[in-house]
Image (cartoon, rainbow, N blue to C red):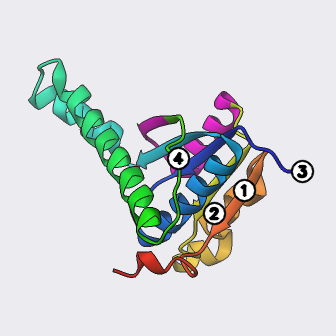
Amino acid sequence: MFKTDRILFPLDYSNVSRAALSLALQIADRHGSELFMLHVQKDLDRELQRRIVYAPDESAVEDAIAAEEQGLREALDLEIQRAADVGVTLRRPHTHLIVTGGEPLEVVLQLIEEEQIDLVVTGTHGPKGVLGWLRGSVSQQLVDKAPCSVFVVKPQGYPYLRD
């Protein structure tokens, strides 16, 4: 039987990502798994450096990260509520909120190793542009490179996302 204790969910706030979060919550509920919610902002490092220079008080960086963490909490609450609205009760899993900068694929692969992730649940937008068609989407690259299972989700089948 499949059992997972630690699920990683990268969130980009798209509808595809919401469908994946719904599935990650359902799996976490069924298996009693911990959920690692990750948001990667490509330019976060530069933005934080800018804030330190132009707003050198100690709370600028902490406030920026806290705002992103609040966004993750709100996404989690929204999906639990949407599931409840269609008659599915999901328990809130033990959740770790991670906000960082960098390249999404690299960050996810590093986090899989550091946190001993069993399963990654991610949405896919498909390949973008010529480079995407040559290399594959980030989700496809993750499937190829991740040392754990990767569940790639499309938004079909989640009618409460159509709002």
Q: Give yes or no for contact between labels 2 and 1 (Cβ–Cβ under 8 Å).
A: yes
What count of labels does the image hold? 4
Question: Taking 123 as reference, is 149 left or right?
Answer: right
Dot 1 amino acid type: Val
Residue linked to disc 3: 1
Dot 4 amino acid type: Arg
Q: For numbered disc 2, what is the local secondary structure?
A: helix
Give the CA separation, mark 4 to mark 2: 27 Å
Dot 3 amino acid type: Met
| First of labels 2, 1 by sequence position | 2
Q: Quadrant location of residue 58?
A: top left
Q: Viewer-nearest of labels 1 and 3?
A: 3
Give the CA separation, mark 2 to mark 1: 9 Å
Q: Give yes or no for contact between labels 4 and 2 (Cβ–Cβ under 8 Å).
A: no
Residue under the point 84% across and 50% down: 2
Q: Viewer-nearest of labels 1 and 4?
A: 4
Q: Give yes or no for contact between labels 1 and 3 (Cβ–Cβ under 8 Å).
A: no
Which sits in the foreground, 73 or 132? 73
